[in-house]
Image (cartoon, helix red, strand yellow):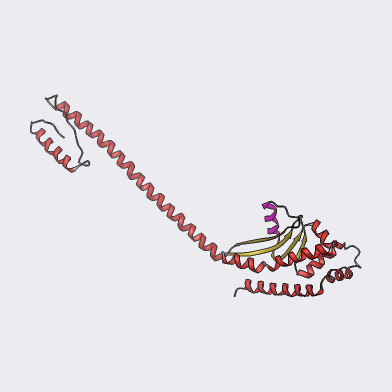
Amino acid sequence: MSVFGVNERLAAYQYANKTQKGNAAGKTNFADTVKQTAENSSASRQEQYVEYLKQRYGANVMVKQIGNDQRSIDNFGASIAGYNNVAIAPNILVQMANDPEKAAYYEQKIQKALADFPKHQAIASANGFELSSYAVYVDEKGVVYKLVTGDLKPEVRAKIEAQVRAEQAAKRARRQKYQELATEAAERRRQLVELQYQKQLMEDALKKSSFDTSVNYHFISRTQTSAAAMAYDSAIGTYDGGMPGDIY
């Protein structure tokens, strides 16, 4: 069992134990907290309530409004660590601190969201990720969100990077092969142009050297067809012997 798994189970046990004690005490918990801090005149009711929530959940409780844009969410995720974070919009915190029914409603939502962490951790792990932080956020409209940050497991990242390197190597090999084929094709085209030029020169030379202007000469390369090449060789031999004629 990994250290990560042991720590998560220990945190879940500690959280469940605190929750059970809080439920047994009921609504008197916050009243007790207010009474205990009454001597501190600088502490507002909201500050006292935040302290109560910290004691109840054993969590890092923040009074914070997070923007709905991705950058704000990412910045918040980067600013926290661990798996027991609670952020509450200021207006919602005021409602919770002054209205027992609102407090009970949102506390139950927060408790449920915190208890869901092991499930989300298991889902992330099954998909090759490991979580680095987890937070429950109650926005200004009272909507409860779960904010999770994490990254690929090192072994999964290494496997993906190896696959990427292999694919890049294969692409380089294909590009090299295509380049070689393109070079060969260009060389063949050059040879064909050269051959066509030589054929034209040969035909022109044959026409100029022939006494019979009615004869048409067609020079066929060996590379075109072996049968035609043999016919050409035979015709050239005849021409050299003083007997010009048609060459096909």
Q: Position of residue 152 (x, y in %)?
A: 58, 62
Q: Is residue 63 left or right of residue 119?
A: right
Rendered residue at 35%/47% (across/down): 181
Q: For this rendering, which residue is in front, 71 or 16?
A: 16
Quadrant in which residue 103 is drawn: bottom right
Rendered residue at 45%/58% (across/down): 166
Q: Position of residue 145 (x, y in %)?
A: 70, 59
Quarter of the image with the N terminus is bottom right
Q: Position of residue 150 (x, y in %)?
A: 63, 62
Q: For this rendering, which residue is in front, 170 or 94?
A: 94
Quadrant in which residue 66 is drawn: bottom right
Q: Is residue 70 left or right of residue 52?
A: left
Rendered residue at 80%/58% (across/down): 92
Q: Position of residue 69 (x, y in %)?
A: 69, 51
Quarter of the image with the C terminus is top left
The answer to whether residue 230 is above or below residue 213 is below
Quadrant in which residue 25 is drawn: bottom right
Q: Which residues are magenta?
A: 67-79
Rendered residue at 87%/69% (across/down): 31
The answer to whether residue 45 is above or below residue 238 is below
Q: Is residue 198 left or right of residue 157?
A: left
